[in-house]
Amino acid sequence: MLGGDTPRASVPGEISIDHADGFYSYAAKYVDEAGTVTKIPAQLSRAQVEEVQRLALATFQVLECEGLARVDLFLAASGEVYVNEINTLPGFTAVSMFPKLWQATGVSAAQLMNFLIEDALARAARKRARRTSV
């Protein structure tokens, strides 16, 4: 998620667990190189992508987030989508999901950084403009 007043969602990504313990455990995530499979973009139908993005945007907005966040969701076998968590300070390394998702959406790392800096400066300016002296 990016933005404040008019947030936007990246393409969704997918993490599949392929670890012996069957969970997205520490070992699956950080130790076993084959413990997870990441797919960007996620292998979803158009309707599923729209629902995932709608729910992610709604979560971002209802929590009054600004700037950036990553909304993690579960897709149940029934097709229902559930919010798992929101990460308001997602990883930002070359191997992190957040920049990879935006890259797949068509936003380069440089564009992403520029957006975040400009958005933060604009938010700060709006806050300064609202201040009054007493």
Image (spheres, helix red, strand yellow):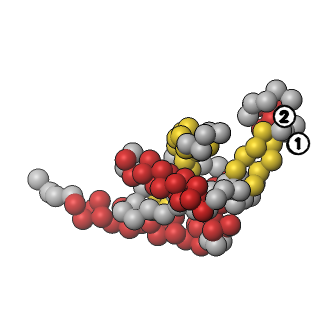
Residue at image position (80%, 42%) is: 36
Image quadrant where residue 98 sits: bottom right
Percent across and percent down for residue 134 are 11, 53
Image quadrant where residue 111 sits: bottom right
Tell me: residue 88, above or below residue 43: above
The total of numbered circles placed on residues is 2
Residue type at tag 1: Ala
Residue receiving disc 1: 34
Residue at image position (77%, 51%) is: 38
Looking at the image, the residue that sits furthest to the front is 78
Percent across and percent down for residue 108 are 65, 71
Tell me: residue 69, above or below residue 35: below
**Mark 2 nearby-residue class (10 Å; few <14, some 14–19, many ≥20):** some
Image quadrant where residue 4 sits: bottom left
- The alpha-carbon separation of the residues under discs 2 and 1 comes to 7 Å
Left or right: where does residue 73 sit relative to residue 58? right
In-front residue for pair 62/75: 75
Q: Can the viewer see residue 60?
A: no
Residue at image position (59%, 67%) is: 112
In-front residue for pair 131/111: 111
Say whether marks 2 and 1 touch (CB < 8 Å).
yes
Left or right: where does residue 87 sit relative to residue 25? left
Q: Earlier in the sequence, mark 2 or mark 1?
A: 2
Residue type at tag 2: His
Residue receiving disc 2: 19
In-front residue for pair 41/98: 41
Tell me: residue 18, above or below residue 93: above
Percent across and percent down for residue 50 are 53, 59
Q: Secondary structure at mark 1?
A: loop
